[in-house]
Image (cartoon, grey):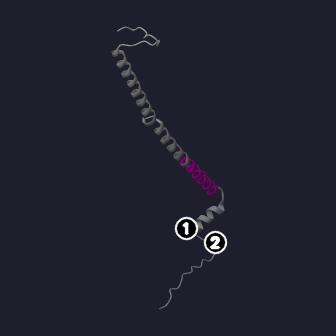
Amino acid sequence: MTDSPTPGTGKRVLPPKAGRGRRALKAAMWIGAALLLAEAFFGERGFTALIEARKQHHAMQSSLDQLRSENAALRSRARRLREDPQAIEEIARRDLRLQAEGEIVFIVKDKKPEK
């Protein structure tokens, strides 16, 4: 067989072996493309991994914002305890149950009902 154009079509007729080789090459290329696409979506650095990383980033950002807010509140409380005598007195009265000089403390207990 020759590689000459067929009369009337202008297309070349290839030997049967060349046609099978091209089909095999096309099939291999499609399989390779499918594997690359699967890797792009499901691989270690694929689309699904990107979505998961974004979720983790959002969760960590929220946690960081919460910790920063808590840290700011603790700094404010520490500053208040260093600088404000009323804050110290308030905590001493509430937590340590201390009283100021000259104050009289009344302890009121509920009476149990009689039967």
In the image, which residues are magenta?
63-82
* Amino acid type of the residue that numbered disc 1 sits on in the rendered structure: Leu
Q: In the rendered image, which residue does mark 1 sit on?
A: 96
In the displayed structure, 80 sits above or below 15; it is: below
Residue 93 position in % (x across, y down): 59, 68
Residue drawn at (36%, 15%) of the image:
18
**Badge 2 or badge 1: first in the primary sequence:** 1
Where on the picture, by quarter, is residue 94? bottom right
Of 46 and 92, nearer the camera is: 46
Mark 2 burial class by Cα count in 10 Å: few <14, some 14-19, many 20+: few
Of 21 and 36, nearer the camera is: 21
Q: In the rendered image, which residue does mark 2 sit on?
A: 101
Of 27 and 65, nearer the camera is: 27
Q: Taken as a whole, is the magenta stretch helix, strand or loop? A: helix
Q: At numbered mark 1, what does the secondary structure look like: helix, strand or loop?
A: loop
Image quarter where the N terminus lies is top left
Whether residue 26 sits left or right of residue 106 in the image: it is left
Residue 90 position in % (x across, y down): 62, 65
Residue 99 position in % (x across, y down): 60, 71
* 102 drawn magenta: no
Q: CA distance from mark 2 to mark 1?
A: 15 Å
Residue drawn at (38%, 13%) of the image:
14
Mark 1 burial class by Cα count in 10 Å: few <14, some 14-19, many 20+: few
Q: Name the residue furthest front.
A: 8
Where on the picture, by quarter, is residue 95? bottom right
Q: At numbered mark 2, what does the secondary structure look like: helix, strand or loop?
A: loop
Residue drawn at (40%, 30%) of the image:
35
Residue drawn at (57%, 53%) of the image:
70
Residue 89 position in % (x across, y down): 62, 65
